[in-house]
Image (cartoon, helix red, strand yellow):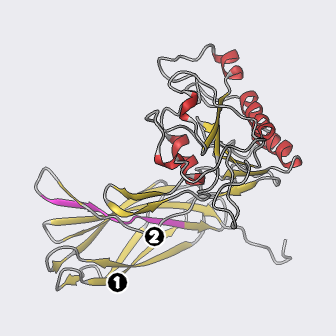
Amino acid sequence: MSLGHRSSCSTRATASSPRPTPPATSWWECSTPASGRRGKSIDDTGFGPVPAGWKSACKEGKDFKATFCNRKLIGARYFSKGYEARMGPIDESRESRSPRDIDGHGTRTSSTAAGSAMTDASLLGFATGTARGMATWARVAAYKVCWAGGWFSSDILAAMDKAVDDGCHVLSLSLGGGMSDYYSVPIGAFNAMEKGVLVSCSAGNAGPSASSLSNVAPWTTTVGAGTLDQDFPAYVVLGNGKNDATNRSFAVAFATTSGNGGGVEMVKHTRTMTNVGEPGTYKATVATAVTGGEVKVAVEPADPRFKKEGGKQSYTVSFSAPSPPSESFGFGRLEWSDGKHVVANPIAFAWTVRTEKNADGD
């Protein structure tokens, strides 16, 4: 389930069939395209009729018509009784009292889970290729539970129970509740699990630090985010006439041996840089700002020279710091400049507790 959006239900085709099997999955992040029209991520080309045993419906409301559904998006509901009992009627001048996704989060997360293949996709012209969800042959249904003023357990539980009753086989939720033991998501997930429905939840946006996960009930599958090892450098011409480019960032995680800090910790990153301009020498400069301490940064080589466009050189950045208390953080910026062009690497620092066993192994 996605924060502020509705869930979805989908089915996946078997390996021997070019068409989907009956409804198998409920992806709680799905929503209609923000434009109100059918987007390519819910293209139903190649899908057969909606399975006869499917119980859900496409509930109409402001900015959402039943005709927005198709053989891919086979259900759309919204749940607001708990919200409106506490907060009053939904202000339809701000949002739609319907399954409609207003800010796009539900559309994005549902297409990640089960979006149809989209050719010629790119990030502002970079990395052109085919974009697709994890289960392209999954059908999708949506259950919206979050609103501008918040979301309530009664609505979440009602939506989860309804998704199970509609015939979903998997619930995928991007809705978090921290480390609370018994709030709505694990309760609803337990009911789903007892009925043979897999519940997949997001690990949340917090961390890296101890006890920062969301959705840790043992009867759910908790999924963390991944990263992409691709860079998309591009120059920006500043007002002073210089060119500036932001490059791949550094995420530097230090470990402390206790909650009150410890000895000096060192982290090293080795990377390769590519010259995309004319030959020249680039000099490295670093600036950092850390709460409760400082970080020393060494770059080797600090002044690489490129003899031609497309030339490559490896470099190593060493970060060292006396450990401040855990939960400390900081930021920095590594800049490479030839006097005309500036390429920058953002830096983020964090300190987490490293647990050490004593002599007895406890």
Which residue is tagged 2?
229
- Residue closer to the observer: 352 or 187: 187
Q: Residue at x 44, y 62 (%)?
A: 130
Q: Is residue 147 above or below residue 165?
A: above
The answer to which of marks 2 and 1 sits earlier in the sequence is 2
Residues shaded magenta: 242-253
Which residue lies most toward the bottom here? 307
Front of the two marks 2 and 1: 2
> Where on the picture, by quarter, is residue 328?
bottom right
The percent position of residue 14, horizontal first and vertical second, equals 70, 62
Label 2: how many residues lie within 10 Å, few (<14), some (14-19) or many (20+)? Answer: few
Residue underneath mark 1:
314
User: In this orientation, does residue 341 appear?
Assistant: yes
Characterize the magenta stretch by its predominant secondary structure: strand
- Res 326 visible: no
Please state which of residues 140 and 276 is positioned toward the viewer in this rendering. Answer: 140
Indicate the secondary structure of the residue bearing disc 1: strand
Magenta-drawn stretch contains 187 = no
Residue 154 at what x, y percent from top left?
76, 28
Q: Residue at x 62, y 56 (%)?
A: 137
Q: What number is the disc on residue 291?
A: none
Q: Who's the residue at 28% across and 77% down the image?
A: 274
- The amino acid sitting under disc 2 is Asp
User: How far apart in space, not on screen, are marks 2 and 1 (Cα)?
Assistant: 16 Å
Q: Give the left or right position of residue 177, taking residue 131 as reference.
A: right
From the viewer's perspective, is 307 left or right of 121?
left
Which amino acid, mark 1?
Answer: Ser
For label 1, count other residues whose C-alpha is less than 10 Å away and answer few (under 14), some (14-19) or many (20+). few
The residue at the far top in this view is 88
